[in-house]
Amino acid sequence: SIQALLDTIAQHVDPLLDQGRVASYIPALARVEPRQFGMAFAPIDGPIEGTGAWRTPFSIQSISKVFALALVVAGDGERLWSRVGREPSGSPFNSLVQLEHERGIPRNPFINAGALVVMDRLLSLAGDAAGAVLELLRAESGNPAVDMDPEVAASEAAHGSRNAALAHFMASFGNLENPVETVLDAYFRTCALRMTCEDLARAGLFLARHGLRADGSPLLTRSEAKRIHAVMLTCGTYDAAGDFAYRVGLPVKSGVGGGLLAVLPGRGVLATWAPALDPRGNSLAGLEALDVFTTRTGWSIF
Ligand code: GLN
């Protein structure tokens, strides 16, 4: 059964929890106990199952970038792609180097520069961009208690020089519509969203349902959902996207809080959380857990 498989995976990854390092750029993440692992599987047509710390809230960080992207694609269709590329960067998530060559057009919407452009567009579309992402997460997870961690949001801003540099650099090329400070504030607050594997797996189900929300209404067309899956597969885990495709074979989005969101189109969503990261900023035990899950079940997109 899925429950037995999840429990086996939790045991299997246990030795990995001592390897890697938790994100240390802000105190709220640096003090997270590394020996934690949670995993949830939400099928599109059945009850959710989970193991370990699957009901412990954690900072979802860059996983929020998928939800922001979905809202902008829902509002704007293809228009976003004149301002953001959709090629894997092969670079770290906060890299500045490609932006100059590409004249302020970020390589994809999941590196920080691209996510800042997505936030900028969402501000124009929704007014309160971070609030719109929060509302989507609450509605799709069915948990109105999902919220932002104010300490994390404040620390993101206090340690946000690199993101500020990215935003100003893009603004210098005319690739932001709103004031840099407004974009950064929305970005930092969105990074500070906090939820459990259970909430996250449920919240991602609209992707597995090819764009259909929990209430049955369409957020995305089938084709838009396909495109978001493709960008997750090629760009969702930064310069490790090739390794994730090789080992997991699913569209995945990672965050430096140690979470991973993986979509099984037409079938369900997996969410994992293990705070210790590999050098590229992805959860070490989470990657192994997804690898074992897709290898044992044969459920990948390949
Ligand atoms: N808050 C982090 C940053 O902007 C998010 C990065 C991530 O989760 N990969 O640097």
Image: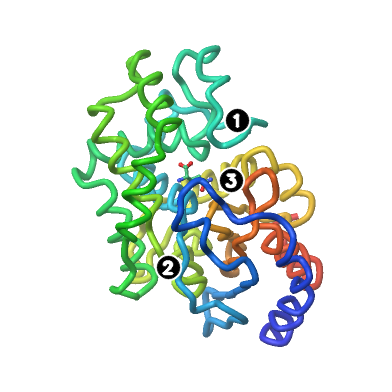
Q: Which residue is mark 3?
A: 236
Q: Secondary structure at mark 2?
A: strand
Distance from Cα at disc 2 to Cα at disc 1: 29 Å
**Location of residue 222 with respect to 116 vertically, above or below:** below
Residue 97 % position (x, y): 57, 20
Q: Quadrant of the N terminus?
A: bottom right
Q: Residues within 10 Å of mark 2 (few under 14, many from 20)?
A: many
Q: Residues within 10 Å of mark 1 (few under 14, many from 20)?
A: few
**Location of residue 127 with respect to 120 vertically, above or below:** below
Give the quadrant of residue 4: bottom right
Residue 7 % position (x, y): 70, 83
Q: Residue furthest left?
A: 127
Q: Quadrant of the C terminus?
A: bottom right
- Which scheme is used to colour this image of the protein? rainbow
Q: Quick one: 197 or 235, which is closer to the camera?
A: 197
Disc 3 residue: CB within 8 Å of ligand 1: no
Residue 251 % position (x, y): 62, 52
> Looking at the image, is mark 1 or mark 3 nearer the viewer?
3
User: Looking at the picture, which amino acid does disc 3 mark?
Assistant: Gly
Distance from Cα at disc 1 to Cα at disc 3: 11 Å
User: Looking at the picture, which amino acid does disc 2 mark?
Assistant: Met
Disc on the earlier residue, 2 or 1: 1
Residue at the (64%, 41%) spot, across then down: 234
Distance from Cα at disc 2 to Cα at disc 3: 19 Å
Residue at the (36%, 69%) spot, across then down: 216
> Looking at the image, is mark 2 or mark 1 nearer the viewer?
2
Q: Which residue is mark 1?
A: 87
**Location of residue 53 with respect to 223 vertically, above or below:** below
Q: Which residue is mark 2?
A: 195
Disc on the earlier residue, 2 or 3: 2
Q: Are marks 1 and 3 in contact (CB under 8 Å)?
A: no
Residue 16 % position (x, y): 76, 66
